[in-house]
Amino acid sequence: MYSGVQFSLYPMSGDFVGVITNALGALDPHRERLKIETDDVSTLLVGPPETLFPAMRDIFVAAASSGVHCVLSATVSRGCPGGEDQSICDTEETVGAVADLKDRIASATKKVADAPRTGQPVNGQFALYVLGSDTHMPEVYGCIELLENAGILEKPKHFVTKVEGDAGAVFEGLSEVFLRFGPSEGHVTLDVTISANSPSKTA
Amino acid sequence: MYSGVQFSLYPMSGDFVGVITNALGALDPHRERLKIETDDVSTLLVGPPETLFPAMRDIFVAAASSGVHCVLSATVSRGCPGGEDQSICDTEETVGAVADLKDRIASATKKVADAPRTGQPVNGQFALYVLGSDTHMPEVYGCIELLENAGILEKPKHFVTKVEGDAGAVFEGLSEVFLRFGPSEGHVTLDVTISANSPSKTA
């Protein structure tokens, strides 16, 4: 399955280049399993679907540890029909809607509960898109139930769902959304925004 | 038709609050036709589909005129089945795939050519998602043809399509993508990133 992400990191600082450069080392443990390419707008990661959110979590937490208000924005995709199947994406994970929604929510909730905490609080929002399938909205409502059970739901709002919590739980929760919802072989995308150190945090 | 956007503006400056505050006045001419709500992660605009990109263009160009590296990130949506139909979204525009792809591309290309220029160069990328329909990929390839004809295509890359040009042309091009592709009554979303004043602009 072809899977990957285009993500960008936005430190709200005149030294944004320094904040990003200092955080790059956090990607090192992930480089072996990922193809990584950066241009002037975003960084591409292509690799097994379960590796994408841990890699983004680590670079984001590293950047946020600067204390600067940082935002990560990401377009995550699996099963995109435009892309060739690449062996670097091979996974032993069982991906997609292979069990009842109820069972998927229960096992994903446990994954979030078991995820290591980072000490970095974050909040953010996401939209899940299940392309070429009539299961889009039931899967979206299933995700919201998962996030509520996992204690990282802030609230649904127009077009997106807000999340909050420790970065370890939030990135694991979004990873589970990406891995467990939508058809196994279908085209599924996530539009993700994660924020830390915001002066206007209202939650 | 229920339509709107969640967007965020990221000025890469310690004075990010000041840059955003100074740009807010650019939304004033649009306020009458839009419902606007801001929280700690993004700003919601709900209104007629043709008003969304002009409003985002004006606030983005105002922020970028500071000279600071600024990024706008947006989740744009029409026909979202989760939302109630709101009269503020009423439009006299004909929206969606109401004509042959070829004819839609031709009229959209003309709209981009006729759009007022702003003097602000931008680049960025977007993904178009046509939900619950098997026309997703033909519509995406149609968009790429439009952007190429309109002279604002940089290149397709993994998961997204890169655009560049004057902000007037780029925002009009993305507005046309949003308005002319995908079914009239369907659920269509765009995931958009627009950047200005980047020190690492490589194009």
Image (cartoon, coloured by chain):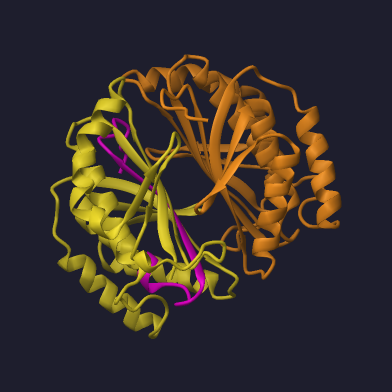
Chain colours: A yellow, B orange
In the rendered view, does B132 fall on the left or right side of A174? right
Quarter assignment of residue A88 = bottom left
Q: Is residue A200 magenta?
A: yes
* Looking at the image, residue B164 lies above or below residue B105: above
* Residue A37 found in image quarter: top left
B54 with respect to B7 (left or right) = right
User: From where the camera sits, is residue B89 visible?
Assistant: no
Residue drawn 48% across and 68% down? A79
Give the quadrant of the N terminus of chain A.
bottom left
**Which span of residues is magenta-colored?**
A178-203
Q: State the quadrant of the C terminus of chain A.
A: top left
Residue toward you, A5 or B8: A5
> Measured along the vertical axis of the image, is residue A9 above or below residue B116?
below
Query: Is residue A154 in the magenta section?
Result: no
Q: How many marks?
A: 0
Q: Position of residue A153 (x, y in %)?
A: 32, 58
Asked if residue B93 is positioned above or below residue A14 in the image, the reply reads below
Is residue B154 shown to the viewer in this render?
A: yes
Q: Residue B2: image x %, image y %?
A: 66, 53
Please state the horizontal and vertical placement of residue B142, each as a whole percent of the image. Answer: 72, 53
Residue at 54% from the left image edge and 41% from the top image edge = B125
Residue B21, given in percent of the width and then of the height, sits at 45, 20
Furthest toward the top, the residue is B66
Tell me where residue A195 sits by quadrant.
top left
Residue extending farthest bottom: A99
